[in-house]
Amino acid sequence: MSGENQRVDAPRSPYAVPAQPPVPPAPAQSRVRRLASPGLTLAAAALAFAYVGTVDPNEPGHYPVCPLFRLTGILCPGCGGLRSAHAFAQGDLITALGANALAVAGYFVFAGFMILWLVRACRGGPTPRFALRRPYWWAIGVLALVFVVVRNLPFGAALAP
């Protein structure tokens, strides 16, 4: 036989580190455990909307007044958010948009994120990450700032609650 096909093992050093045994895979989580976090988050949001849906923020005395509005008379990006949530919980999308359109957009973003989270949890996939790059955060901040400025000017009165 020729020496081409023969394998020659290198001599072992007395200082060689022994091979580590393979790491066993992590045990699969049960479906109930995977659905616990998104399910509890969704339940908390539903309870909050149910409360705001039954306790009308349009009646004085139920909720505190926005401190920025109380001190300066300027509507912040969140002003009208509770009235918007109340109308949204009642199924009145037009009134909800009139109270705070930015909040309604946030409700839909939250709903989309929750659907993605629940689907991935059901399938055993990874938890979705909400990590945006810096330009997107700047864009969201600029959008909120433009929303505040426009809703506080006379021509943007339609955006004020």
Image (cartoon, rainbow, N blue to C red):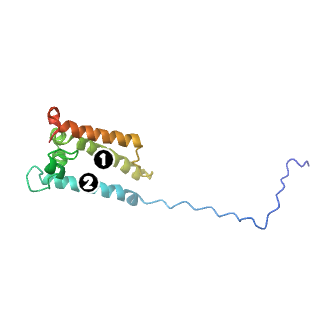
Say few, some or many: other residues with alpha carbon within 10 Å of mark 2 (under 14 / 14 to 19 / 20 or more).
few
Q: Is residue 117 left or right of residue 28?
A: left
Residue 8 vs 4, above or below: the answer is below
Q: Amino acid at mark 1?
A: Phe
Residue located beneath label 1 in the image: 110
- Image spot of residue 25 (x, y percent): 55, 60
**Residue found farthest to the bottom:** 14
Q: Amino acid at mark 2?
A: Ala
Label 1 or label 2, whichever comes before in sequence order: 2
Look at 17% across and 42% down and name the residue there.
Answer: 96
Q: Nearer the viewer, residue 79 or 15?
A: 79
Q: Is residue 60 left or right of residue 152?
A: left
Q: Which picture quadrant has residue 31?
A: bottom left
Please tell me whether mark 1 sits on a helix, a strand or a loop.
Answer: helix
Q: Which mark is residue 34?
A: none
- Asked if the residue at tag 2 contacts the one at tag 1, i.e. Cβ–Cβ closer than 8 Å, the answer is yes
- Image spot of residue 160 (x, y percent): 15, 40
Look at 21% across and 52% down and name the residue there.
Answer: 49
Q: Nearer the viewer, residue 5 or 114?
A: 114
Please tell me whether mark 2 sits on a helix, a strand or a loop.
Answer: helix
Q: Is the C terminus in the top left, top right, bottom left or bottom right quadrant?
A: top left
- Image spot of residue 50 (x, y percent): 19, 54
Number of marks in the rendered image: 2
Say few, some or many: other residues with alpha carbon within 10 Å of mark 1 (under 14 / 14 to 19 / 20 or more).
some
Q: Nearer the viewer, residue 157 or 71?
A: 71
**Residue found farthest to the top:** 155
Residue 14 vs 92, above or below: the answer is below
Using the numbered discs, state the Cα–Cα distance from disc 1 to disc 2 in whole angstroms.
10 Å
Look at 11% across and 56% down and name the residue there.
Answer: 62
Q: Which mark is residue 45?
A: 2
Look at 17% across and 35% down and name the residue there.
Answer: 153
